[in-house]
Image: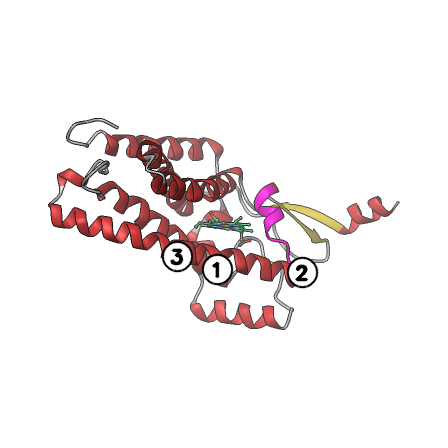
Amino acid sequence: MAVQQQAGTVRRLKVWDPWVRLVHWSIVLLIPFSWWTAETGRFDLHFLSGYAILALVLFRIAWGLVGSETARFTHFLRAPGAALRHLAHLRRRDAPLEVGHNAAGGWMVLLLLLLLLAQATLGLFADDDVLSAGPLARRVDGNLSAAATSVHVRLFWLLLAFAVLHVLAVIVYRALGRNLVKPMVTGVIDVPRSEPLIAPRLGSPALAAVLLAGSVGFVWWITTLRPDSMF
Ligand code: HEM
């Protein structure tokens, strides 16, 4: 009886498509893996991990332009004032339920994606002068490659700092009664029927598959640009 009542008062909205979730949780695994492989000198694996991150982020950016409504940058990037208003509402615990990223989270998402893109791209040009060089390192001037290496090493800590901030924000939302993790795992939110929220339009799986294959193909092509054409 209680379950029927529950089912009657709550409806399920699919807010995150499988592609956004795939990208997100793959990146969560690949970041510590990239760090560990670099620290332990397993550069073949480090390169593979970096290529995977680059392909996933390129796909996510393309999906942010033409994909599901909640994945689109135009859906979640709003004026900075809207982000501040959201945070003020959050403090008063009266922030409205939203489908997709809220105005403050949207900026964090953009920042994380750009940091990931920069980190993976710089890795292509990095060269430790001993064991390993990214596929494009020897195609550019040595000073440029040295600069890319230096920024690649340092940017990781900035990326980590923002990733930690991101996870802390998710924990704060949980403490304020909003579970954001479950929807990022299942794709679904439960909303009271009284809430006038509309289910977002989800992107075409065929288009997602083509974009993902295109991103993987593009990154694979970059790996072939290494002068000795090895991986
Ligand atoms: C265990 C650690 C993590 C948890 C629990 C977590 C949780 C989440 C949740 C709940 C969201 C959705 C937020 C919302 O509802 O608006 C999200 C989004 C996102 N997170 Fe994480 N996150 C974690 C680690 C990371 C890391 C390490 C990164 C990358 C540095 C990252 C990057 C992102 C990005 C880019 C999005 C936006 C997803 C999209 O629209 O594609 N997350 N995360």
Instruction: Inspect the magenta stretch and tell me whether residue 180 lies in it.
Output: yes
228, 90: nearer the viewer: 228
Q: Residues within 10 Å of mark 1 (few under 14, many from 20)?
A: few
175, 44: nearer the viewer: 44
Left or right relative to 93: residue 112: left
Left or right relative to 215: residue 222: left
Q: Is residue 18 visible?
A: yes
Q: CA distance from mark 3 to mark 1?
A: 12 Å
Q: Main secondary structure of the magenta part?
A: helix
Q: Residue at x 30, y 55 (%)?
A: 154
Q: Quadrant of the N terminus?
A: top right
Q: What's the residue type where badge 2 is placed?
A: Gly
Query: In what element is the residue under mark 2?
Result: loop
Q: Is residue 110 visible?
A: no
Q: Which residues are magenta?
A: 178-185
Left or right relative to 167: residue 194: right
* Residue 177, numbered label: 2
Q: Which residue position holds label 3?
A: 111
Q: In this figure, which colouring scheme has been used for the structure?
A: secondary structure
Query: In what element is the residue under mark 3?
Result: helix
Residue 152 x/y as whole percent: 28, 50
Q: Earlier in the sequence, mark 2 or mark 1?
A: 1
Q: Which residue position holds label 1?
A: 165
Q: Residue at x 62, y 64 (%)?
A: 96
